[in-house]
Image (tube, rainbow, N blue to C red):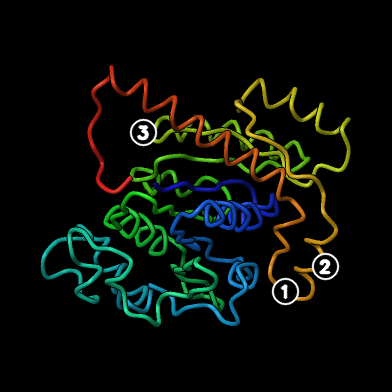
Amino acid sequence: MKISVCGKGGSGKSTLAALLAAEFRRRGNRVLVVDSDESNSGLYRMLGLHQPPRPLMELAGGKKNIQKAMRTAFSDEGEYQGTPVLSREKFRLQDLPPDYIGRNNGISLVQIGKIHQALEGCACPMGVLSREFLKKLQTSSGEVVIIDMEAGIEHFGRGVETSIRAVVAAVEPSLDSLELAGKIKSLALASGANFAGSVINKAASPALVKKLTGELRKTAEPLLGVVDFHPEFIDASLEGRPLPHQAAAREIREITDAILNTLDQEAVSQRFIKTPDIGGK
């Protein structure tokens, strides 16, 4: 099962992804977190890793190699010169070299790539690599993949969501974030993914939650739940410590239950509607 976390920059996507990973692991699942955000570099610390794994961009032969492949088709023979693992039609996490997987307390981390210097070009190759990696990655029962998407909605244009089971929108208290959540919902549904719902993040008061809930009902319901404003998260981020997920344990349990309930409802409806089967969702 693959679940993507989307939203504007600063909405708390990485925090929500790390919280979901910890909760799914607590429930006995095997969890993989995919860092698909080309700019934010702190997710590995939130997960308790001392250093990030090597980026898959290196395994794919670098940005220039993927840019060359983008001129035709990513999987065309002779165009893709990366490792044989990524050029397969299907593969599993254990097929990747160990240096490209970070592990801590039963949670694995894969990093697509980051922008490290000026004038190195656009992030399009990273989006292509995210799409192909998620499309070809096969999961089994009891395996959950949480994807921390890049900020914004450009990834929808690259088709990254075509192999994702559920899309979750992280919403902070701002008009921009509310408007973007509505766009995320419409684009997710248009791409064939299930929009699981929105999560209000960094909520400082019940009055603020009530106001945000009313706005989300207009554009991006259902509301999956609320993560309050937790000073512990700010302290951990400033000090580079693992995210103290226990601080939001009750909140994230309710959000996870709501996501699973949405997927259960989708499964029931799919018994009566035939849709193309995209492998590995």
**Left or right of 226 in this view: 203:** right
Residue at label 3? 192
Q: Report helix, strand or loop for mark 1.
A: loop
Residue at label 1? 241
- Labels 3 and 2: the sequence-earlier one: 3
Rendered location of residue 216, percent (x, y)? 68, 27
**Left or right of 186 in this view: 244:** right
Mark 1 vs mark 3, CA separation in Å: 37 Å
Query: Looking at the figure, which quarter contains the C terminus?
Result: top left
Amino acid type at image mark 3: Gly
Q: Which mark is residue 134?
A: none
Mark 1 vs mark 2, CA separation in Å: 8 Å
State yes or no: discs 3 and 2 in contact (Cβ < 8 Å): no
- Labels 1 and 3: the sequence-earlier one: 3
Residue sitting at x 48%, y 68%: 109
Mark 3 vs mark 2, CA separation in Å: 39 Å
Label 2 environment density (alpha carbons within 10 Å; few <14, some 14–19, many ≥20): few
Label 1 environment density (alpha carbons within 10 Å; few <14, some 14–19, many ≥20): some
| Marks 3, 2: nearer the viewer | 2
Amino acid type at image mark 2: Asp
Amino acid type at image mark 1: Arg
Rendered location of residue 278, percent (x, y)? 26, 41
Residue 215 vs 133, above or below: the answer is above
**Left or right of 187 in this view: 252:** right
Residue at label 2? 235
- Labels 1 and 2: the sequence-earlier one: 2
State yes or no: discs 1 and 2 in contact (Cβ < 8 Å): yes
Rendered location of residue 219, percent (x, y)? 62, 24
Residue sitting at x 44%, y 54%: 145
